[in-house]
Amino acid sequence: MHYLQLMIYNWRKFKGQNQTYESISEDIELITFDVKEMSLNEELNKFSKPFVNIYRSFSIPKYNNDTLESLVTHICMMDKVEDFIILGCALQEIFSNNFNESLGFAGIGFSNYKKDFEKLLNFLSEYLHSESRTPYSGILFKNKLGNESLQNPFVIDDVYEAIFKGFNINKENFETRKVEILNGTNLFDLKKNAERFKDDFIKIFFSFLKENLTSENQCFRVVGVFLHIFSVPYKTKAESIDITADIKTLLSLVDYQHIRNNIIRDRNFHT
C-alpha cells in the first residue's frame, strides 16, 4: 500500500438546522489517528474496507473521542476502541457523502433519470411510427463548450438507428422493451441512499454487539449513542445531535424502540 497516495479524512459535523454536513471550525481540538486494518468481524471489516483503502489518517474531535472511550469502557470493550473509531469514521464518510449528495445537483439529476428516459422513449416511439422523417430535421448536442446541431438526414438516421440498436428496440418489441427499460430505472431513491447505508450498518453492528453484550436493549442504546458520537442521526427526520451528557444519560436518551424497528423490518428504498 502506497501511503503517500492516500488521503486524510477530515471530520464532518452534522448541522441539524441546515440538514447538511460541514467541516468543523478550526478552534475545535482534534486527535489524529493513522488508519489501520480492522479486526472486528468480517461484515464490519468489509463495511470499513473502502475507507481503509482510501485514507491514511483521520482526525476526530477530542470530545467525541472521549465520549467514545466512555462508551466502550461502559460495555467493557476498550480493546476495540481504535477499531470503533475507524468504523465510525467510515460510517460518517459514506453517510455524509450520500446525505449531502441527495440535497445537491446529483440528487436532482437522479430524480430526473426515469422522467428523461420516458421522454426519450416517447420520442423514439414517434420516430419509429412516423410515415415521414421530415419533422426530424436535426439533432442538438449540448456540452460545456457550446451546442452542436446535426442537420444531415443520413447522419440523423444513423444516430437514431444506433440508439435503437443500443437499446435493442424495433417496432415489434417497442412496448415490451419500453416497460423493461423503465423498470430498470427503478433503482433506489438517492434521497434514501444515505438511510440505506445507515440501516445496513445498524443491522451488522447490532449483530456484532449482540455477540458481546447480554441485553438486546443495551445493544440498541449503544448503537444510538455510537451513531451520535460520529455525527450520524439515527432517525430519518434528522435532528441536532448533542453528546454533552455523561454516558449513562446518553444511553438512557436513545429511542431504542426506533432502532429496534429499523432492524426487524425491511425498509423500501425503491421508487
Image (cartoon, helix red, strand yellow):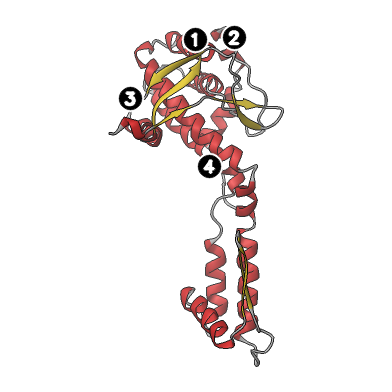
Which label belongs to residue 249?
2
Is disc 2 placed on a helix, strand or loop?
helix
Which label belongs to residue 66?
1
Quarter holding the N terminus is: top left
Which label belongs to residue 88?
none
Residue at which label 4 appears: 266
Residue at which label 3 appears: 36
Question: Which mark's residue is nearer the viewer, 4 or 2?
Answer: 2
Within-10-Å neighbours for mark 3: few <14, some 14–19, many 20+: some
Residue 99 seen in render = yes
User: Which badge, 1 or 4, comes first in the chain's sequence?
Assistant: 1
Within-10-Å neighbours for mark 2: few <14, some 14–19, many 20+: few
Q: CA distance from mark 1 to mark 4?
A: 34 Å
Residue at image coords 34%, 13%:
79
- Amino acid type of the residue that numbered disc 1 sits on in the rendered structure: Asp
- Amino acid type of the residue that numbered disc 4 sits on in the rendered structure: Asp
Is disc 1 placed on a helix, strand or loop?
helix
Q: CA distance from mark 1 to mark 2?
A: 15 Å
As displayed, is residue 104 above or below residue 178?
A: above
> How far across and how far down the image is residue 246, in percent?
57, 7
Question: Which mark's residue is nearer the viewer, 3 or 2?
Answer: 3
Question: Which mark's residue is nearer the viewer, 1 or 4?
Answer: 1
Q: Determine contact: label 1, label 2, CB under 8 Å.
A: no
Q: Foreground: 31 or 203?
A: 31
User: Which badge, 1 or 2, comes first in the chain's sequence?
Assistant: 1
Q: Determine contact: label 3, label 1, CB under 8 Å.
A: no
- Amino acid type of the residue that numbered disc 2 sits on in the rendered structure: Thr
User: Which badge, 3 or 1, comes first in the chain's sequence?
Assistant: 3
